[in-house]
Amino acid sequence: MPIRSRRNVPSSKASGARRSSAKLWGTVAGGAAVVTAAGVVVSMTTGTPPATAPSVSAPAHSAPQASGEGVRELHGVPVGYPHTRSGAKAAAANYTTVGGSSQFLTDKDARHRAVAVMATRDSAGAAVKKADHVAEDAVGSLQGDTSKVSAKRTVARTGVLSAHVLGFDAHGAMVRLWTTTVRGSTAGHATPKTGFQSVTVTLTWESDDWKLKDSTASTGLVAPIDVRQASNVPTDFSDYASAAAEDPVLRGAEDRSGFPAPYGHNERGARAAAVSATMLYGDPRFFTDEDWRHRMLSATAASSVLYSVTSDTDSTARLVMENRGVGADGTTVDGSELITRTAALATRSISYSDQAASVELWTASVGGVAGKDETQRPQVAFLRMTVDLVWEDGTWKTTAVTPSEPLVPSPPAMQEAAPADSFADVGGASNAPATA
């Protein structure tokens, strides 16, 4: 799929697309390589091997689920997950996203209905009280510098950057998420603020679905905003206020190749395919593992663009590896680890028909190398992306992913960036979030 700037690269000029792709991946002053692939902005930094995660039970293995529909919604809550690790990751991510949404935080009745859907039978009462307390605490962050919260103008979005399964068996799972949040209002003069959290979600397999037993949150690794991105003004966020866009829904449904199962032939399926494409382009294996990259492209890109996008991404991935001195194992000679992740904060449909769709996403991408060089610490960049898709071979395939103007919140208040080497804890394939 062409990775291009719509303004500068006519689709009829393949050589122009290649030049644009190389420019997007490029390098910047100070030696920090910056990669934009499918809107994935990656500022390279360094690291140490991931810490060993605790386990709550022995791992269990379930066969992948291949389903065109899978997850559905009940009272605004995605339900119906596969009984797999990926399904548990998806449930943990979706329940965390719902719990941080504008409707959940501002509408008591909607919040209580959502909790009734998410929570286990035994934990429902305590979960309602906890949710009410969280909503009460969130008021200040949602009103910006105005005197009260305007529900329609709130910005309350959550993006999942990593998901690590701490324990899993047939009866339960524990998943640790690293998330970025954006909270604020499009009214007033205060730009919505970003934040980072570490969220540990405990799930129980109940009534043939993953149910929420408990969730705890603390401050997560703080990545500084890319130095080349300036904060937008509040009104710029209007397209992604509560009433204007939708939260992404992750399914965790995979085919036997490990990539997303076929999507439903509807607008929801097109949105999900767009979300997965941007997430997969932000996976570190995109840069370090040629076989994985080729299989991913075969699974997600339309046949009409597969040859050109494979050629272009091979070139740009090699460029990044060479510029950063990263080997096929994803590390540098001193053991520093390549860290790249992309999360979708929200989606908007631009156009839809039975055969073609265009979806705009607001994304947050973290990238760097986790290691001792603090100047190479991972940074986060916020972009709007347009993903064009066609219906092909029984699913949605991408034909183009086009970065557009950044949409940048204010940095976290009174929080220092985490040390560069600490980001190794969210690296590696095992920490990849479930796809949509």
Image (cartoon, grey):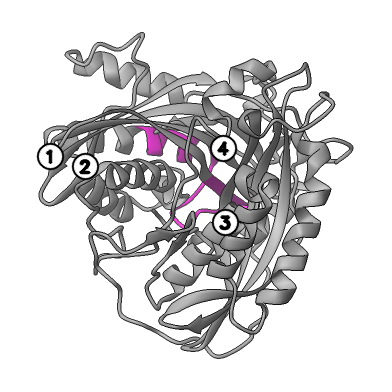
Residue picked out by circle 2: 397
Q: Which residue position holds label 3?
A: 162
Q: Nearer the viewer, residue 221 or 266?
A: 266
Question: Mark 4 falls on what kind of element?
Answer: strand
**Whether label 2 touches label 1, CB < 8 Å:** yes
- Asked whether the beta carbons under mark 3 and mark 4 sit within 8 Å of each other, the answer is no
Q: Which mark is residue 303?
A: 1
Q: CA distance from mark 3 to mark 2?
A: 24 Å
Q: Position of residue 106 (x, y in %)?
A: 69, 44
Label 3 secondary element: strand
Residue 267: quadrant of the picture: top left
Q: Position of residue 227 (x, y in %)?
A: 70, 23
Rendered image: mark on residue 364: 4
The relative height of residue 16 versus residue 109 in the rendered view (above or below) is: above
Give the residue type that dot 3 points to: Ser
Q: Is 224 above or below relative to 52? A: above
Label 3 – label 4 distance at C-alpha: 12 Å
Identify which residue, 407 or 27, lies in the foreground: 407
| First along the sequence among labels 2 and 1 | 1
Q: Which residues are magenta?
A: 316-341
Mark 3 packing: few (<14 Cα in 10 Å), some, or many (20+)?
many
Q: CA distance from mark 3 to mark 1?
A: 30 Å
Work out how far the residue at label 2 is from the one at label 4, CA to CA, in angstroms.
Answer: 22 Å
Tell me the SS state at disc 2.
Answer: strand
| Up/down of 269 relative to 129, above or below | above
N-terminal-most mark, 3 or 2: 3
Q: Residue at x 57, y 22 (%)?
A: 238
